[in-house]
Image: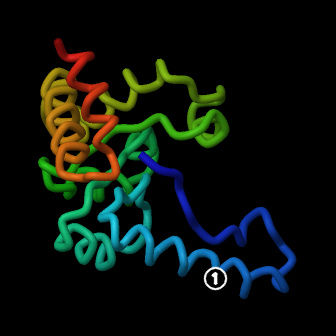
Amino acid sequence: MGGEIGLDFFFVKDDSTYPRQRTVFQHFLAAAREQNKVVHWYSGPLDIFRELAALGVYFTMGIEPRYSAHVRAIAEAIPQDRLLSETDNPGAPKAYIGRPGTPLLIQEVVRGLAKVRGTTAEEIERTVEANLRRLVRDDPWLADVECRLTRLGN
């Protein structure tokens, strides 16, 4: 469904690269805006979250709501029809769980989202599946993904 984009000021300490990073970032933001992409593991300010939610974008959540009150508040506030789950890359979860992330981590993500949102893991799974199907159905860029999901569901 795409990759993630951002500014890397944490790992890249050479601030002479920052203007070029901003230029590339702005290019990708413009492309994402045209394609109505998903916001990946958002953990920024709540006012910006509300603006993004008002635009109708989808949000992915990983395991971070289990460890961050701020991200937990975001996970609680994501509109149900815009919630997606993710495990992120192998490195990011290590800071929270002490081991690399794997696809099996999705079970913990789903259980964590269920707890945060006051529902069941089964309901989160149904919600995420319905949202994913709607997302790919409504996006001509993802027509091949929709075909694969349809084959998996049958």
Which corner quadrant of the image does residue 133 belong to? top left
Front-lying residue, 4 or 119: 4
Nearer to me, 107 or 66: 107
Name the residue at 25% across, 53% down: 139
Q: Position of residue 44 (x, y in %)?
A: 43, 69
Q: Position of residue 45 (x, y in %)?
A: 39, 74
What is the quadrant of the N terminus in the image?
top left
Q: Quadrant of residue 115?
A: top left
Residue name at image x 16 percent, y 21 percent? 122
Please, is residue 34 above or below residue 83 in the view? below
The structure residue drawn at horizontal position 44% and vertical position 38%, both measured from the top left corner, is 63
- Amino acid under label 1? Arg
Q: Is residue 109 above or below residue 26?
A: above
Quarter of the figure that contains the C terminus = top left
Q: Residue at x 18, y 44 (%)?
A: 137
Tell me where residue 85 appears, x and y as whole percent: 34, 38
Q: Secondary structure at mark 1?
A: helix
Mark 1, Cα crowd under 10 Å, few <14 / some 14-19 / many 20+, is: some
From this view, report whether residue 62 is shown above or below residue 99: below
Pointer 1 residue: 22
